[in-house]
Each structure stands twice: as structure tokens, then as C-alpha cells.
Image: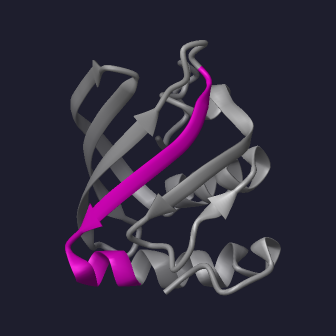
């Protein structure tokens, strides 16, 4: 999530040390708490606005749906599926986004900004 809101993040505070992030903007999964955090925070910095549209939890999964505007003027919609262990920790997160033009733009920007930090070809 973006902005300066100091409330608890829907999952970053609960990531396991071996957490895995998959999603539309990624060629392959990102692994490890700090790497997942790095990607999610970088995405948030590329949003000029973000509005939550749905939040629900069912059987160890939290679903977060939101609309966002990229700083370059493109809009996108996203759904995050956050898997939780019995203790509340988060081992896996998947974020699906659309439309494709926004996804490709976001992924390219992420590749430029943090691609080398992750040590591979994670971004489209």
C-alpha cells in the first residue's frame, strides 16, 4: 500500500523469513522477507494514488483488491491473495494486476529501479 499512512500494512509486517511473492509484473518469484518488502515498497512509490475496493479473509487467506494510478498517468486494478499460517505469519503473496499496458509499464519501471538489487531477470 502506498502513502504516508502509519497503520499496519496488510502483510509486510507478517512476512516469514522465506516469504515468496509472485505476480503479474514478475517473470519469476521473489523470495525472502527483505526482497519481498523491497518490491512491494518500490511498487508503492510508483503509485500516485491507491484506493482499496475490497478486503476479506477466508480460510487462512486475505484478499485485497484495489485501484491505483501510476505516476505516469496509467491506471491499474490489482488483487492480492495473501496466504497466512495458523500463527498469522505470511509465507506467500500473489498479486494479479491489469490492464496489460499498465502492468508492462510498472514492471519496466521496477526493473530499472530495483532489478539489479534482486540479482536476476525478475521483471518483464
Across and down, in percent, residue 122 comes to 61, 79
Which residue is rendered at x = 64% and y = 63% of the image?
A: 30
Quadrant of the rendered image containing residue 85: top right
75 w.r.t. 27: above or below: above
Position of residue 74 measured from the top left corner of the image (x, y, whole percent): 27, 73
Q: Position of residue 8 (x, y in %)?
A: 55, 20
Q: Foreground residue, 33 or 67? A: 33
Q: Is residue 71 above or below residue 84?
A: below
User: Which x, y percent locates residue 7?
Assistant: 53, 18
Residue 111 versus residue 48: which sits nearer the camera?
A: 111
Colour convention: one colour
The magenta span reads 89-104
In depth, the one of 74 and 17 nearer the eye is 17
Residue 38 painted magenta: no
Residue 91 among magenta residues: yes
How many numbered badges does the structure rendering display? 0
- The residue under the point 65% across, 86% down is 121
Q: Residue at x 43, y 37 (%)?
A: 82
* Vertical placement of residue 110 versus 62, above or below: below
Amino acid at each position: 500500500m502506498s502513502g504516508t499512512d502509519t497503520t499496519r500494512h496488510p502483510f509486510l509486517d507478517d512476512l516469514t523469513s522465506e516469504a515468496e511473492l509472485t505476480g503479474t509484473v514478475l517473470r519469476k518469484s521473489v523470495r525472502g522477507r527483505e526482497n519481498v518488502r523491497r518490491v512491494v515498497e518500490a511498487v508503492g512509490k510508483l503509485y500516485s494514488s491507491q484506493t482499496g475496493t475490497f478486503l476479506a479473509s477466508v480460510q487462512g487467506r486475505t484478499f485485497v483488491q484495489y485501484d491505483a494510478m501510476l505516476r505516469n498517468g496509467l491506471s491499474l486494478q490489482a488483487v492480492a491473495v495473501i496466504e497466512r499460517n495458523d500463527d498469522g505469519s505470511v509465507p506467500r503473496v500473489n498479486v494479479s494486476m491489469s490492464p496489460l499496458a499498465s502492468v508492462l509499464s510498472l514492471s519496466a519501471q521496477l526493473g530499472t529501479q530495483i532489478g539489479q538489487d534482486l540479482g536476476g531477470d525478475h521483471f518483464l
